[in-house]
Amino acid sequence: MKMKNRKNYNDRNASFGAFAVFALALSGTALASDAHTLERRALVIPSTLPAGFKSQGCVLDNVNGAGRTLQSATTSSPTMTIETCINFCNGQGFFFAGVEFADECYCGNTLAPGGTNTTITDCNMACAGNANEPCGAGNRLNLFWNGKTPPPSPQTVPSVGKWVSLGCFTDNVNGAGRSLPNPTTPNGQVSIESCTTACFNAGFRLSGTEFADECYCASAIANGGTQAALTDCNMVCQGNSSEFCGGPNRLNVYNYTGTDLPVVSTGGGGGGGTGTAVGVFPVLSGLPTGWSYNACWVDNLVGRVFVEQQPGDESLTIQSCIAQCAAQNFTIAGTEFSDQCFCGNTINNGGAIATDPTTCNMGCAGNSTQACGGPNRLSVYSSKPIVALPVPSAMKTNLPGNWTYAGCLRETATGKMFANQIIWIGNNTALACMNQCAAFGYSAAGVEFGQECYCGDTIDVKNNNGVFGAESECTTPCPGDPVHLCGDGNRLNTYFWNGPNGTANNWHTPANIGRYEFFVPGLVVPLIATLGINNKVTFLEKGGTGIPNATGAYELDLSLSSNFSAMWREMHIKTDVFCSGSVIMPDKAGRQINVAGWAEESNFGVRLYTPSGSAGINGTTDWEENVDELALQKARWYPTAAVLANGSILVMGGEIGSNAAPQPNLEILPKPPGGSTVVPLDFLERTDPNNLYPFIFVLPSKNLFVAYYNEARILNPVTFDTITTLPNMPGNVNNFLAGRTYPLEGAAVPFPQFAPYTDPLRVLICGGSTNGAGEATDNCVSIAPEVHNATWTLERMPSKRVMPCMVSLPDGTFMIMNGATQGVAGFGLANNPNLNALLYDPTQPVGSRFSILNNTIVARMYHSEAILLPDGRVLVSGSDPQTDNPDGTVKYPEEFRIEVYIPPYLNQGFTQPTFTLPKNDWAYGSVNTITNVKLFQGTTAKMRVSLVAATSSTHGNAMGARTIFPAFSCSGTTCSITAPPNAGVSPPGWHQLFILDGPTPSHSQWVRIGGDPAQLGNWPNLPGFTVPGV
């Protein structure tokens, strides 16, 4: 995979980003002498971190000057790494650690307001001390937590008895004099309690603490004392470490709201004993049109009465709070505790109007004469009549589908109970969460902390030793449905599909699962594998891999697998086929065409091979290439090749090279003399670089289905205009932007077609991944593109898989194998190989189509392939991940071993049927005979016939894939097979013809269907090429 420059929208980020790309380029040059190895490097958080710390994602920090998310210790270092920061914070006893802007480290025990989660890809700057790790970005923190409950943080005490906090005030700034002029000595060490008691006893209505151990009293604010930021009062009281007692030139001020102050005869410098309080009042005029004061409401009787809280505002006024709420189309605004603003359209959680309206008596942070609520009191304003909703409860009735309510589940001590988190700020509901989890095949759904939805499986509760608490532990209303609960902090209102042991999928675990077998040792690490019509396998490899002095091309004679020296035939290519595309042409020789490649003239390469020889007998032909005579019109890397219904060759997409421009167009071969067949495709330009190796299939209408990134459309096969833009493909349950084509690589095949071909063709796409974190996709999606209002059907797989290979089998099923469970395609960009094989049976009901088969011991990741062999086995080859351990040792090696998978239909030990094919060139709609049909388990009455199109496999793209079950009839041992009717059902080309005796396939024989309508057999009539004719 290529390195890609990323746009940064912060000046400092931009300069750092340019340096990072330059440094990464130097690093790549130092590590590899061959430019071929330049591939995209992902930033990866280590799976194991010091002191039990775990990643909490990417969070906002100090956006628009809102303040640091972690406000305690900090350090910076040119050698900063995630581990360095965690060790620094842990050593000072902090529970949270965060890295930002490559070299900065922050610590704390609490997260300040505004430190909310954002997309993980926002944290995209490499650590200064480790270019493989993310260290946040501008105003973005990679956050880590040790899982422990932090100690209570010091706080500004909201009230002590009838004393109510007015906030933080300036004092004696620039020698102006004391704001509360009467110093007082409390009984014992200074705390809010001791200072207010001392001031009460002295008859003062105002009490203030400063510099941790100073106490002052007065009856009015004097000497220009004004409201300051609450965070300015940040010194812990000498007598109570859980309270703040002002700061340098800052007072925590409290107002006595009772009427029983003792009378004092002398006032002292601050107004003495006059008893005059600082007055605050509701705002009754000067409000935005339509808004008016409603009442003083009690908050937190059961829970918060508003779901939406705005960021803390040290200049808050009633008008500014209303403006924030109105801008978001809310009809109710409420202020509390002087600097907090809340918005909503209803009063929730059983909120009630306060019996004493004067308890909303705290002055607004930005205007001390305006009442901005108080402790657990809200000054509420509205533009419409207010609806007060009852105390919310868990949603237990009218649940969708087979969901049942399980209870209030306690989160795990470390990590999460359910792995898939979705955050729906402002509109999360239990209903939406259940529907989302069900749509993606999960059997457990949980809502937590109001805005969070989690999807998992019922077995997760058992595996994580889950404990259900009392229903009273879940108290937070859903922001999108405030009459129902959405958990609480570390509490989930939990729902199960089909009960506590239920599942949402019927994944089969058959007794006969087939098996992997070692087949032969290899000479190459192939990136393209193709079964030729001579029943030999051609392998093409990236330059620089394989044995020393490798030629880049080899052919494997399957019949000589026991003779290593004879099984391999050396072939030759002139340019580098790294990440090219291949397909078998419909000419009478069944030539293989390979197009594009890595860099310079290889980008334009057109290479042709005519299969020759037979089982046990070497061929004499070789790859033919002459870039001076025959070349693509556009430089391409990672393109797809396909045979169109008219028999010509389509080449689509790709990029010019590593870190280079996209090639958002297509071209047609053969190219007419003097003309251009290049057609621009804006949808490829828009979705670069996530659309490489697009999936292309000819539809029964002869139009083209194209899938790229997470989109799909139908194109006219002549003009290549868009006929239909299809819905976007579903992605991951928690990330709709997951993609399906390289580098977010999945795999695709068309469903089998059955005579009389009246059913619409359906396309299956499995696996994929996400940008950034590389969260591999655990589902398949399918669509019938040509039906009216086509929609995608999603089926969850038993495991996550990126870089899978899919193989069409002769019985109409599909093998899904190879790949990884994390990462994206490219060198060093994936981890955790998926060693399990799956079988997908499209004849079964949705949700019951997967069977879990056997496992391999060989990691098959980037540049691994799988193809169908003539005897019905699957050949599995390659893997070139170039992934190392942190100490530099190889983690996943280049893989030379070649395996075969014995599918269940061959693992029963039944004898394979046989037949004779008199004629192998079939016209559309023609009736053709096979003879000497011999079955060993059943009769021809239950026999099946299948045609599996010639396929070339690379990067999860089975170019040319198609499966057809034609009509046939038998008399004795002779059967008549009716060829497909047209090039929409079956584009012209070569097919493996199988007969099936029950589940058991025969060995295949090659059949050409539809001839050579583009007369490719006469092309290219140029020096250096041999044409077979038509």
Image: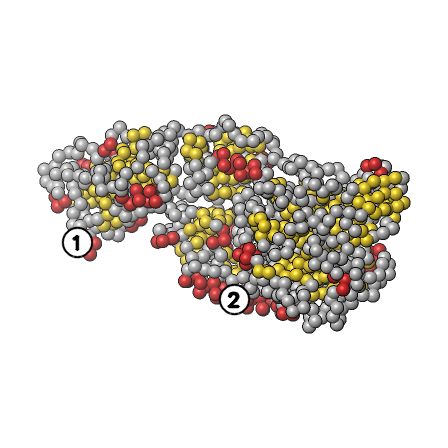
Q: Pick out the residue farthest to the top.
A: 397
Amino acid carrying mark 1 in the image: Ala
**173 is higher (above) or lower (below) than 331:** below
Name the residue tied to disc 1. 176
Who comes first in sequence, dot 2 or dot 1? 2
Horizontal side of residue 1015 vs 17, given as left or right: right
Quadrant of the rendered image containing residue 512: top right
Q: Tell me the quarter of the image containing the N terminus.
A: bottom right
Q: Tell me the quarter of the image containing the C terminus.
A: bottom right
| Residue drawn at x 44%, y 31% as measured from the top left | 484
| Residue drawn at x 44%, y 32% as measured from the top left | 485
Return the residue nearer the eye: 73 or 173.
173
Return the residue nearer the eye: 395 or 490.
395
Q: Pick out the residue farthest to the left.
A: 265
Amino acid carrying mark 2 in the image: Ala
**Circle 2: element type:** helix
Name the residue tied to disc 2. 23
**Circle 1: element type:** loop
- Tell me, for residue 640, which label it has, or none: none
Spatial distance from mark 2 to mark 1, Cα to Cα? Answer: 54 Å
